[in-house]
Amino acid sequence: GAVVSQHPSRVICKSGTSVKIECRSLDFQATTMFWYRQFPKQSLMLMATSNEGSKATYEQGVEKDKFLINHASLTLSTLTVTSAHPEDSSFYICSARVGGAAGELFFGEGSRLTVL
Amino acid sequence: DAKTTQPPSMDCAEGRAANLPCNHSTISGNEYVYWYRQIHSQGPQYIIHGLKNNETNEMASLIITEDRKSSTLILPHATLRDTAVYYCIVRVASGYGQNFVFGPGTRLSVLP
């Protein structure tokens, strides 16, 4: 099946610094990618929809100035967590849709962010 | 998108079939049923999806009732590596911009 790759898989940073997470579609082009966040023992929550060549669409309650999304090409979307704080520690997962109208969504491996 | 209801947890003996139910009584005619699973600390993995007919692939079978208000994911011979959280999602087919909404899922434990 289609492959979506994330990097880094794990990152630890100090409070106040910024962290960038990359999401790549390896064998297909993705005009739309989705970014999810997952806290321990909870389900995935959509943060934003990343659109190639245009601004991302953020879900209610997600600060667009804190979670910067850039989708500059058909195979790469990036999520930058700016001025990270310990409460931003979470598992961040990206995904992209493949195929026709009923196409399934493929997910990256996830990136675990720990803010000290 | 229609809301789904799944049992929070299930156990299954290794080598036996695992049958995971999902209720989606408010599903619309143009909504597909998708199943994903998430093994600990990994991204969700696509399993199978269907609209009306039963579907089978190398991983599992999907049985959808005639009225489409419920479905069952069947793992024919569960192994320890099938231990994961299984998510049932119903979603309209159209529009690349539409995301998948994840509920709490069913935590399947395959026991030796």
Image (spheres, rainbow, N blue to C red):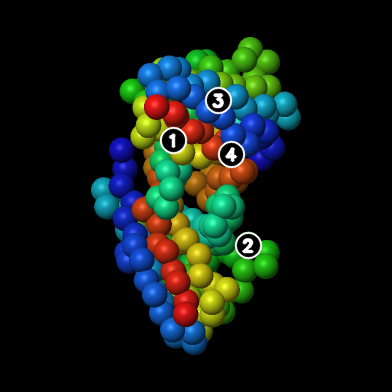
Of badges 2 and 4, nearer the viewer stands 4
Q: Is residue A114 above or below residue A106?
A: below
Neighbourhood count class around disc 3 (C-alpha, 10 Å): few under 14, some 14–19, many 20 upward: many
Residue depicted at x 59% and y 34%: B9
Query: What residue sits 51% from the left and 39% below the top?
Result: B85
Tag 4, which secondary structure?
Answer: loop
Q: Provide the residue designation for mark 3.
A: B20
Q: Which residue is mark 4?
A: B105
Q: The residue under label 2 is which amino acid type?
A: Glu
First along the sequence among labels 1 and 3: 3
Q: Residue furthest top?
A: B66
Closest to the camera, between mark 2 and mark 1, is 1
- The Cα–Cα distance between marks 2 and 3, rounded to whole angstroms, is 30 Å
Callout 1: helix, strand or loop? loop
Separation of marks 2 and 1 at Cα, in angstroms: 31 Å
Disc 1 with disc 3 on a shared chain = yes
Residue B16 versus residue B99 in the image, above or below: above
Binning the other alpha carbons within 10 Å of mark 1 as few (below 14), some (14 to 19) or many (20 upward) gives many
